[in-house]
Amino acid sequence: MLEAITPPAPDKIIQLIQMFREDPREQKIDLGVGVYKNASGITPVMEAVKEAEMRLWNSQLTKTYTSLVGEVSYHDAMIKLILNDTVARDRIAAAHTPGGTGAVRMAFETIKMASPDSTFWISNPSWPNHKSILGFIGMNMREYSYFDSASRSTDFSGMMTDLQDAREGDAIVLHGCCHNPTGSDLSYSQWEELAEFLQARKIIPIIDFAYQGFGDGLEEDAKALRMIASKFPETLIAGSCSKNFGLYRDRVGILLVVNQDDKIKGNIQNVLASLNRLSISFPPDHGGSLVTIILNDDELSVLWKDELEATRKNLLDLRVKLAAELRDLTGSDRFGFLASHKGMFSLTGCTPEQVLTMQEKHGIYLVGDSRINVAGLNEEKIPYMAKAMVDAGM
Ligand code: LMR
């Protein structure tokens, strides 16, 4: 019977991890999966996390199940981090999910339960898993323009034109900051214009918020999201601690659903519990406990924020240096966009053939859509990378 299943096409980001591992060349560079690496190419466990692990080890008395939605102390700490006090706590339902992806999946399932005929609007391009998950759960989806490949910046007017077709009850997936894969974010005034339009049309926002702290800073990155959550009757937010706490493999995510009132919130809280029960039963706890310890301790919070800020600055520094190296090499500013994009990713706009040349000739692995993860670089690798880009005709 099982031979009847056709395996789905492999996710291009996941496929690249394997190809990179199998490449024996020493000078190879991994610019694929969205994982932060320091100058030595290591994805370190943050000091604040190590300290929290010690404290947890010393204090934890049981590994029995947490609740179906995880610990309320984790919800409270994450709500403060993501929304601060912009929305009344009694309007927010929350569930600890396995990673940000778990939260995205749960957000989509929640909309499906409320309105199975809704259309989900996804940016073109977007993180490939958005489309894969929606396809898998059988939802309608449409794409809205997002990126102008000539200027390598956001195509806001194209976006607004496409969204004219959106109808009341549709949902829109937005990237709260550090758009994946383009690296190009909306300006705050564009966010405001978009919010006004979506509100008038009664379109429900789902905000994928996987990179808080990697763009302009922890508070700045949350500004647009907080504005939306404070204005809309309903907003779904998929948060993640994979990147900003470096807790990738511990799968620490959260779905926040901002509801119209506390009564609906009570029902939705039960819906989220049942969605966890039906897929994973109880969520993992270890990483969430670490985050709670850090966010509730002044000293550890300061340490974590300093580490996160150093990470953000390193990414920015790499961007500026790569753009400068390419300016020197080409005598043009056509790679200037690298310095203004936010977070780990930039969509370079190179062709699939150029992506292949980078890989085959230079051992540099980009995602097929031309996305680079700048964290895969360091100061020594930048001249090699820049030369390879020019050699590949980018
Ligand atoms: C990425 O886009 O590389 C990350 O979000 C990791 C993933 O799961 O794809």
Image (cartoon, rainbow, N blue to C red):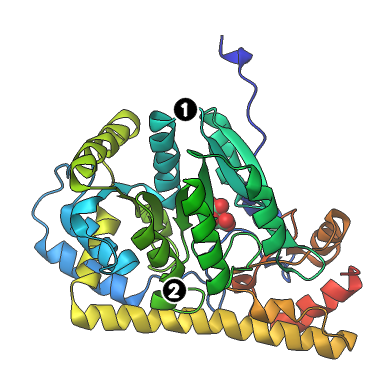
Which residue is at 20% across, 68% downward?
Answer: 293
Foreground residue among 377 and 238: 238
> 192 and 67: which one is in front?
192
In this rendering, is residue 104 above or below 364?
above
Furthest-top residue in this view: 1
Residue beneath disc 2:
213
Relative to 77, is 104 on the left or the right?
right
Q: Is any part of residue 12 visible from this angle?
A: no
Helix, strand, or loop for circle 1? loop
Q: Residue at x 51, y 33 (%)?
A: 118
In this rendering, would 126 be left or right of 392? left
Disc 2: CA contacts within 10 A as few (<14), some (14-19) or many (>=20): many
Q: Nearer the viewer, residue 156 or 377?
A: 156
Residue drawn at x 21%, y 60% as measured from the top left: 76
Note whether 73 is above or below 84 in the view shown: above
Work out which quarter of the rendered image holds the N terminus and state it: top right
Look at the numbered disc 2 and give the secondary structure of its residue: loop
Circle nearer the N terminus (1, 2): 1
Instruction: Name the amino acid type tagged 2.
Output: Gly
Q: Quadrant of residue 155?
A: bottom right
Q: Which residue is mark 1?
A: 116
Q: Nearer the viewer, mark 1 or mark 2?
A: 1
Q: CA distance from mark 1 to mark 2?
A: 34 Å
Q: Residues within 10 Å of mark 1 (few under 14, many from 20)?
A: few
Q: x, y percentage for residue 387?
A: 84, 79
